[in-house]
Image (spheres, rainbow, N blue to C red):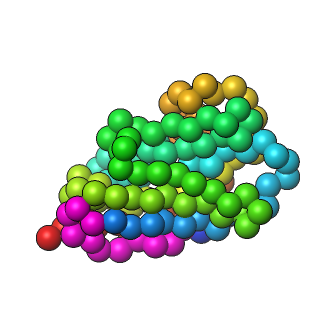
Amino acid sequence: QVQPVESGGGLVQPGGSLRLSCAASRFSSDDYRVGWFRQAPGQEREGIACFASSDDSTYYANSVKGRFTISRDHAKNTFYLQMNNLDPEDTAVYYCATDPKSGTYRNTGVLCKVRYFGSWGQGTQVTVSS
């Protein structure tokens, strides 16, 4: 399966914004999950923003809620992460991931677990620093 590819990372000052893009493989059905994850040095990879089409569920980690927004263009097999009001604590490698699984997630964090995604990008560095 073709792996997704992230782009849009870089260096930004605190309070700034970035928009990450993920070019994903074509989905085999209308049911799929997409997600954004991040990993800082010495830390576990964590899910921060995920979407499941099967029940229109969206999940945001508390650390990014209100600042980050996940969106998608299904026809283009592309999804995005808009990151606003960035903080140095947001510095990490950001990964996009996809999975064809369907289910009922009810906007809960279960839809954004690392172990539930099977197709991963290689990551893009986001550095927030003055």
Q: Residue furthest right?
A: 28
Left or right position of 110 against 92: right
Determine the residue positioned at 29% across, 50% down.
42
Task: Estimate the x, y position of residue 89 in percent, counting from the top left.
Answer: 23, 52
Determine the residue positioned at 60% across, 43% down.
51
Determine the residue positioned at 35% across, 36% down.
62
Image quarter where the C terminus lies is bottom left
Residue 77 in sight: yes
In which quarter of the view is residue 77 placed?
bottom right
Task: Estimate the x, y position of residue 83 in percent, counting from the top left.
Answer: 39, 58
Task: Estimate the x, y position of residue 58 in percent, counting from the top left.
Answer: 56, 38
Q: Is residue 29 magenta?
A: no
Residue 23, relative to residue 29: is it above or below?
Answer: below
Q: Nearer the viewer, residue 41 or 49?
A: 49
Q: Residue furthest left?
A: 130
Image quarter where the N terminus lies is bottom right
Residue 118 in sight: no
Q: Which residues are magenta?
A: 6-16
Task: Estimate the x, y position of residue 20 in percent, counting from the top left.
Answer: 48, 66
Determine the residue positioned at 73% across, 58% down.
74
What is the total number of numbered labels drawn onto the structure image?
Answer: 0
